[in-house]
Image (cartoon, grey):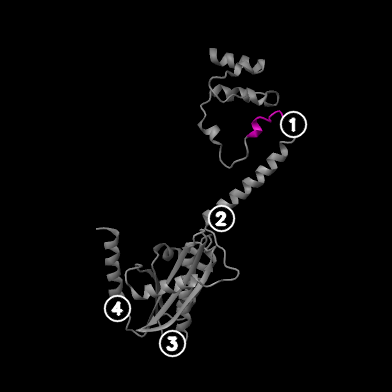
Amino acid sequence: MNLEDDKEKAAMAHIKYVCTFQSDPSHILSYSDRSLCRDEAGQQSTGAGWIGYHGPHEIFQGSKPLGPHMEIYDAEAAAINAAVKAATDYTTENNITHIHVFTDNQAAVQMTFDVVLGSSQHTNLHTCSLILSFLKSSNQHHIEITWAPGHKNIVSNERADALAKAAIEIAVDNPPISFSHEKSQSHRHQHLVIAWTEEWHKQLQHTSAFLQVNRFTPALKPHEHFTHTVTHPATFMAASFNATQVMPLWVSTTTNMSPLKTAPAHVANYFNCMTTS
C-alpha cells in the first residue's frame, strides 16, 4: 500500500467522521490552509485561507496575504490562528459548544501547542490563548485541531486552499517577516563570522610572529586544513614549549617535514629524548 492509498483511506475516514456531527447545531467546522508560490526570479509569496461551516451553511471565510518573507510553517500557524479566532468569535453569538478545526499539515497541528522559542511562538501563544478562553467560558465547551488529508476532494479543505492561493495575489504593505529558529541561528552565525573576519583583517595590518598562521580566517568550526591533514603527534607536543620564540613555519602540518630541522635546541633535545626512550 502506497502513500496515496493511505491518504485516500484517510480522506474517506475524515468525511465519515465529519458526518457524525455536522448536522448537530452545537458544532461548527473550520478548515485552514496556506499556499506558497515562487515566480521565475525565485521570489516567493505566501498566503493563508480559512473557512467555517455551521451545518450545511458557510458562516465565515477569509484570506490574508503574508508577503515574501513568511516561512511555510509560520504561514500554517497564521492560517490556524485565523480559523480559531473566527470560530471562537462566532460562538459568542451562537449556542456553540464544539469547535473542530482541520488543517492538512500534521506538523502544524503539533506546532500549535508547542510554544517554545521559535518564529511562530507569538502566533501559537495567541492561538492557545483563544482556545483557553473558549474552554474556560463553559464546562461544556470542546475544541479540537486535527489533520485532514489535503488535495483529496474534501470540498471544505479545497475551499480553504483556494482562498490561500487567492491571497497570494493581494499586494501587502509591510509584510511580516519570520524565520525558523534554524535559519535565524544560521543568519546570526553568518553575521558573527563577517564581523569577526573584518576585525581579524584589521589586526593583520600589525606585524606579528604568527603572521603565517593568521592567514587562516576565522570560522566557527575548524578549517578543513586542520581536520583532514595527517600530522605527527610530536609536532604539536613540541610546539607547546615556547610558542613566543618559535616561528609558525616550524609548526609543520605534514609528515614529510621534520620539526627537528627548525625547532629550537631545547625542543629538539626533548624530541630526541622522547623518540629514544
Q: Which of marks 2 and 3 is nearer the N terminus?
A: 3
Hey, what amino acid is under mark 2? Answer: Ser
Is residue 11 found left or right of 184 in the rendered image?
Answer: left
Report helix, strand or loop for mark 4. Answer: helix
Kindly indicate whether the residue at mark 1 contacts the one at mark 4 (C-beta within 8 angstroms). no
Residue beneath label 1, please? 207
- Residue 236 place in picture, x, y as percent: 58, 25
Hey, what amino acid is under mark 3? Answer: Asn
Q: How many residues crowd mark 3 within 10 Å: few (<14), some (14–19), many (20+)?
A: few
Residue beneath label 3, please? 94
Rendered view: 150 above or below 94: above
| Image label count | 4
Report the residue at 29% width, 62% height from top.
4
Q: Which of marks 4 and 1 is nearer the N terminus?
A: 4
Report the residue at 53% width, 54% height from top.
183
Report helix, strand or loop for mark 3. Answer: loop
Report the residue at 62% width, 35% height from top.
216
Residue beneath label 2, please? 184
